[in-house]
Amino acid sequence: MMLEIHTKDRGCQSPFIIFIKTNNMKNIFRIDPKTLQPKPINVVGKIIVITIIVTTVLGSILFYSGYKLGKNVLLSLSEEEKLIVIQEYNKFSEDKLIEKLKELNIKFPHIVLAQAKLETGNFTSKVFRENNNLFGMREAHQRITTAKGTENNHAYYHTWYESVLDYSFYQCKYLSNITTEELYFDYLSQSYAENPNYVSILKDMINRENLKMRFGSSK
């Protein structure tokens, strides 16, 4: 009887997975790290193990292939073409803003989206166009900030998403303990807004434009 053994180490203190081929039969066993005794894996276990291995191998191949392809494409571009790619990546859209708010796990994102629309005049204001500032933020000096300085009496950023990141730092610093929309609105009214009607305008916009639905909520 001939044995053909292949092992797969799953890390320290973890059992080994071994494939044992006897004649034309192939079985999968796990080796107990304490007793070093082989224990057969059932059919479902075999399927799971094989699926994990195949997925890992294919994923690695695809990732490496994609990385090489992307790198080769980037290296083949002229400086002008690279600039166009960067500009397209940095180009603002409301959908991109929504995705960034989701990505950063921003609290009450529908309120924050309404703030961005209000503060920028629906993304048309000078402070937004020249400073990439979505929220009318001032340059912070008491917390972490992504602002590069002050222009037009407001913080300015290299890109619009640096402004979103700065708002997330603001939220973490001052709003992390707030758990309800009303408390959030109360804080904005007392510590953020300059317009006494700021919160009522936000609420009206959220309802009128159904902004909660943009984040998968209707409540």
Image (tube, grey):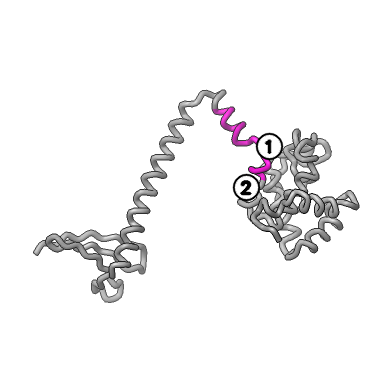
Mark toward the viewer: 1 or 2? 2
User: Where residue 153 sits in the image (x, y, percent)?
Assistant: 83, 39
* Figure check: 37 above or below 28: below
Q: Is residue 15 above or below residue 95?
A: below
**Residue on which disc 1 sits:** 158
Residue in the picture at 34% in, 58% down: 51
Does residue 79 appear left or right of residue 119 in this picture? left
The one of 156 and 81 positioned closer to us in this rendering: 81
Q: Is residue 90 rendered to the left or right of residue 50?
A: right
In primary-sequence order, the first of circles 1 and 2 is 2
Q: Amino acid at mark 1?
A: His
Q: Which SS class for mark 2?
A: helix
Q: How many marks?
A: 2
How would you rate the neighbour count of disc 2 (Cα within 10 Å): few for under 14, some for 14-19, many for 20 or more? Answer: few
The tag on residue 4 is none
1 and 2 marks in contact (CB < 8 Å): no
Residue 173 vertical placement versus 69 (above, below)? below
Task: State the separation of the CA atoms marked 1 and 2.
Answer: 19 Å
Residue 44 image offset from top left, x and y in percent: 32, 67
Quadrant where the N terminus sits is bottom left
Q: Which residue is mark 2?
A: 99
Residue 61, position as x, y percentages in the image:
36, 45
- Residue type at mark 2? Glu
Taking 70 as reference, is 141 above or below it? below
> Residue extending furthest right?
196
Q: Is residue 50 magenta?
A: no
Q: Can you give x and y, in whole percent of width and height, for residue 58 in the image?
A: 36, 49
Q: Which residues are magenta?
A: 82-97
Q: Quadrant of residue 87?
A: top right
